[in-house]
Image (cartoon, rainbow, N blue to C red):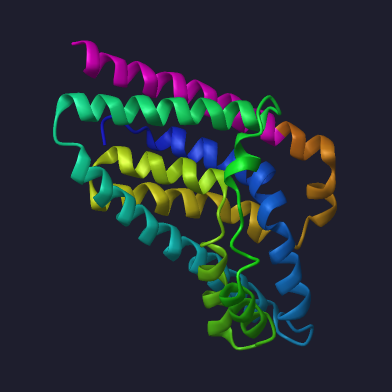
Amino acid sequence: MENISLLSIITIAVLGSFGHCVGMCGGIVIAYSSTKVQSGWSKSKQTFSHILYSFGRVVTYTILGAVFGFLGSVVTFSRTTNGSLLLFTGILMLFVGLSLLGKLKFLTFIEHTVAKQAWYQRSFKILITSNSLNSFFLLGMLNGLLPCGFVYFFAITAASTGNVYLGALVMFIFGVSTIPALFSLGFFVGLFKQSDFRSLMVKLAAIAVLFYGFYIIYLGSRLLLN
């Protein structure tokens, strides 16, 4: 994974999760926390239910990473195609970064949710009203399917690895890195609702994405020009 910095992935995912992801998925976390988690449950059972939900999301992201890594392996068979894919990835990262800063409507444009689809609504209704522990895991997997700019961003990054296992690793790290923000949302709802805090996290994530985007463009250009 010489072209992909794991530190960059973790940094962008953690910062983005405290800004963008909380806004996108926070409502679902609050909804299941107030609906599915029973007040009579022990702290350990409540914690385990949250872990199952988070693990469900990570599993979906990992599977998506493997799929995109495979797709990347199909097209990355020459120096030119490798360079072109990296260049495309870098440009996409710049669009994401500028969108996070409010300069573009890119994320809004691509985040057409599937939540309005009948199959999703039926599945969500069944899982959100169930109190079984496995329903938390399945709800997490379902939430992992929701279109999101950051998911697209890391999916393209996974594709640029050109490897099924590395692609899965990229998305696995992304999923794990978003757990702290969403897991602690129920405990620090007031903090996450503060616009100044979320705005700061989004701006830091945007700067990290922009720097990483320029770096990936540089790597792609080297492959194309040398």
Q: How far across and down, in percent of the image, does residue 83 sit? A: 26, 24
User: Can residue 185 be seen by looking at this rendering?
Assistant: no
Q: How many marks?
A: 0
Q: How far across and down, in percent of the image, does residue 181 sit? A: 65, 52
Q: Main secondary structure of the magenta part?
A: helix
Q: Which residues are magenta?
A: 201-226
**Image quadrant of residue 30?**
bottom right
Residue at figure coordinates x 37%, y 32% from the top left: 5
Residue at figure coordinates x 43%, y 49% from the top left: 173
Q: Most extreme residue toward the top, as rendered?
A: 225
User: Can residue 39 be seen by looking at this rendering?
Assistant: yes
Q: Most extreme residue toward the left, as rendered?
A: 78
Residue at figure coordinates x 68%, y 35% from the top left: 202
Q: Taking 17 as reference, is 59 above or below it?
A: below
Q: Taking 28 as reference, is 86 above or below it?
A: above
Front position in the image: 10 or 224 = 224
Q: In the rendered view, does 47 fall on the left or right side of 177?
A: right
**Image quadrant of residue 63?**
bottom left
**Could you tell me which quadrant the N terminus lies in?**
top left
Q: How far across and down, in percent of the image, does residue 151 sit? A: 50, 48
Q: In the rendered view, does 51 fall on the left or right side of 130?
A: left
**Could you tell me which quadrant the C terminus lies in?**
top left
Q: How far across and down, in percent of the image, does residue 90 sit? A: 42, 26
**Image quadrant of residue 136?**
bottom right
Q: Taking 44 as reference, is 107 above or below it?
A: above
Residue 203 within the magenta-colored segment of the rendering:
yes
Residue at figure coordinates x 62%, y 46% from the top left: 17
